[in-house]
Amino acid sequence: MISDLTSLRRALAAAGITPASVVPAASADRREEAEIHLAQLVEGDRVEALPIGDPVGWPGPVAFLDGVQHSEVVGYAGSSPIVVASAAAAVRERTDRVLATRVMRRRDLAIGRRAALDAAGPALDALERVELSDADPPHPIRELAQAGAALDDARGALEVAVGVAYRGGSSAWLVVDGSLAESPVWARDPRMVGVAKSHSSLPFDGADLESYLRLPVGYRSPIFAPASRRLAPVRAWAVRLWPWEGKDLLHGLIRVEVAPASGTPETADRISRWLMAERAPISAPDPRWDRMLYGIRSVEEFLRATA
Amino acid sequence: MSAPPIGRVVATELKPSTPHQFYFWTATESAVGIGAIVRVDHPGRTVYGVVTDGMAYADLASPLHAVIGAEGDPAAAAHEPTSRTEVRLFLAAVLRQIPEEPLQPVPLGAVHLASDADVELALRMDAYTRSERPTGIPVGVYALGGHESPVLLDADFLLGPEAAHLNITGVSGLATKTSAVEFLLSSIFQTFPSHRGSIAAVCFNVKGPDLCFLDQPGEISERDHALYDKLGLAAEPLTSARYFAPFKADGVNLNTLRTHEALQHNTEPLVWGLREVLDYAEVVMNRDDIDAKADAFIDFLAERVVGREFTDELLRGKPFRVESFADLEEFFRAIFDFMEAMGRGGEVWRTHHIATIRKVRNRLGNISTRAKGLVIDDGAPNDLPWGKFDDRTVYVVDVAGVDPLAQDLVFARCVSKLREHLERRDLGVDHVVVFVDELNKYAPADGPDTYVRKMLLDLAERGRYLGLVLFSAQQFRSQVQRRIVGNAGTSVFGRMDMDELATPAYATLSPAIKIKLATLPKGELMLRHPHFTQPIFARFPRPAMLSGREGVERFPPGAELPFADAVARQLKQLDRRVATDAVRALVEGRQELDVRRALALTRRTRPDDVLAFFTAKLGRRVGGEVVTARSTIRPVPSGVDPYQ
């Protein structure tokens, strides 16, 4: 729908908008800030490496959920940027080792201040309007950051909708790329697992953090309750999928999230063993292959190829 | 409702679609394979292509990632919880685009497996199978992609006049080459359109019993019967067949494996005399022999001496009548005697130098020695029925057991005679297929430019205008004279040797096609034909006739008979009433030369009373005479010599 940005820019120019061409840095990937949000241990009283046992294949069908987004500045109305963006999310289910898409949704957005979007006229009619706040005076850099946040929210909402739609019709496990705390529905679902690759936000400090980050391969951290900065409480633990020595402290380290009701040591061990088995096939050539599950990458590849 | 597509055309900057080729992907499980014919549908344009190469790859950037994922254990890779995404990408060469103009890159359309109708269009067979005067000759079925679609050659391009000749290449031992030619001859005889005239075939059997049983029905499977039905052909042998084979050195037993009693009715001797051989004396000359002087003397013999009365008072008082090699030797002897008598200055006779005369005499004499059994010193010849060829009849000349020189002589004379008669339009048929196996032996790429090679080249380059068509076979196409195979409008390839495929002649074939050719099963072949823009794979049914090996088992060759019995068998072929004992009694004590002469005359005349005619031609028996000691003059007693 917005694949022909050249035509769109021409139409905007005809409407008096000054065409532009830039991918906002904040929107090229998701915004993350390095910070510590202290979590509460719910298993033991200190962070230590717990062995999880031999890898075990995930029993029965399992599905993977991920979303992608892309945005581009297509013009300026005065000093206000107009951003067009796409967000898409999908669930691909694995049965007998073969992945197949079960649910997919997509949104094409035009993001900007109301006045800027109005100035664009009918050129943006085919896109869903997302209006930024007019409370502050125009500031192009701030507006780009706001547009990025709006797109993040749109993608997140899309992922939640897709996940809910899939789980509504299937009893299979659903592995989500990221945190379950995005949605109270997810956070309550006993057959959903969140796998976070990002460690910008760390749950411990001091010796606990050192133990957390220096987990050996095949070990997990104790279960903890992350500080609730999102919508819903979850239980989490870290698993080291690949040896990090000689590489990087975060190499092969994932944070696993489940519903609070599933936050037992037995469940944590079992899911950790399943996740260890998901190391192969590895997701290379993706640079995050040490933490990205192949099923998640498959969803990303599918969305990039089709969205 | 049309079948769902099996693939989609895909084009990238690095792998674009062009007017001559395109890429398409399929599901990992599909019926597409190398050689499959596919159809691309796109609004306003339909493209037909044949798959020439295939690729498969996964989303791995490096094999190292697979090793890491499996932690170095190949067995563990099979137990990965998710199968890697894999693409099956095929490369297809365009066979035809509809519309033909403007010629454009292949569109990004849906790809379907070709149906029977698609195959007909893709191979442009509609031009000659759907016309008012169709000229299609079934050659096999295209049997890839789950379909079995008939493939037909255009008679105008297989048997002339547009193009002609067929060459078949393949490794030995699979019987594909011989079987393919046998099947194709059967197909031609059944389907060659009458509006294109009549047709016969002359096959040279050059090894073993290969072509010795074309007229005998063989067992074929149900599957082959189904193929015959699909092609609209009857599964039957070449019932109208005549066999010719030279004699063995004894002049009465045939030099062939087809000597079983049950096969005698259509097996005849091939016997030539001096007259038949003289015109082809060049065949036995090597490069050094061929000069103007030898030619002039041979021409002198042919025009002035052989077959007519020749008088030269200097040689002898009575005229010469040279009809046989024996007569010719007598003639040469007279010349040499005359020249010896002349002494100094006697080196030239009638402008011909004695060295030239001796050379020609030696070479011609060599023929009767090395081709003994084919060439007779005396007696009547028995030849192919020049001028009386029958429509849809195969004439097999079995030269498998004779000297290579004699084989060359047979090729040269038979093909030359065919050409002569076809030029005069008095052969009896309008087209003749000549089948020569082991072409690399008779027309090698390297080596001396022999008479036979020149003759085959002439046949390949000019035969189609006359209706003279060369079907040839060899193991290595690269070892055959290029112009001969290059003139073959239709080329057939069976299983090939990889070394052969590595030669430049096959550079246009993709590696996948080469691999397929190197592993082709028996009964499958690859075809090039002027109407097909790309090579096509086809399967043909087993010919409905006995193979050489089966034929020898079912009709074991008769034992070589004693002279008298062999004569009796030949006379019995003319008249079943002839008794062997009677012939034995007649032949007893006779000169073999006289018997052979009488037999040849009987065979040529085919009288009503064979035995009486044979007896008459044997002539009066000269009775034996016991020499008794005669009384002599008593010797003079020694010691009383009156002259001492």
Image: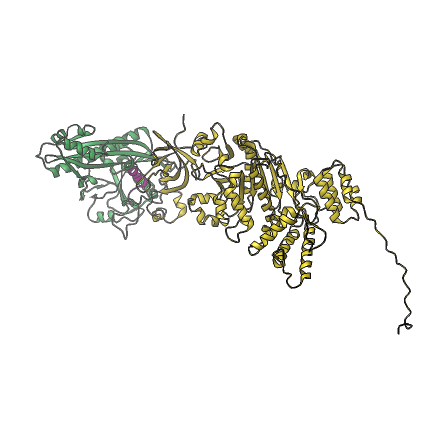
User: Picture coordinates of residue B157 (x, y %)?
Assistant: 48, 37
Could you tell me what secondary structure mostly forms the magenta stretch? helix
Q: Residue furthest top?
A: B1
Which residue is nearer to you in this view: A136 or B547?
B547
Q: Does residue A238 show up magenta in the picture? A: no
Horizontally, residue B400 falls left or right of residue A164, namely right
Chain seen in green? A
Count of marks overlaid on the render: 0
Q: Does residue A294 show up magenta in the picture? A: yes
Horizontally, residue B136 falls left or right of residue B77, namely right
User: Picture coordinates of residue B282 (x, y %)?
Assistant: 58, 51
Q: Residue furthest bottom?
A: B644
Which residue is nearer to you in this view: A235 or A5?
A5
Horizontally, residue A262 falls left or right of residue B186, namely left
* Colour pattern of the rendering: by chain
Vertical side of B302 occupied by B116: above or below: above
Q: Residue furthest front?
A: B313
Which residue is nearer to you in this view: B394 or A186?
B394
Q: Is there any visible trace of residue B200 in the rendered image?
A: yes
Horizontally, residue B175 falls left or right of residue A23, namely right
What colour has chain B?
yellow
**Which quadrant of the figure has residue B17?**
top left
Which residue is nearer to you in this view: A31 or A209?
A31
- Give the residue drawn at x 63%, y 60%: B347
Q: Quadrant of the C terminus of chain B?
A: bottom right
Residue stretch in magenta: A290-301
Q: Is there any visible trace of residue B562 in the rendered image?
A: no
User: Picture coordinates of residue A144 (x, y %)?
Assistant: 15, 37
User: Picture coordinates of residue B162 (x, y %)?
Assistant: 48, 37
- Give the residue drawn at x 79%, y 49%: B589
Q: Quadrant of the N terminus of chain B?
A: top left
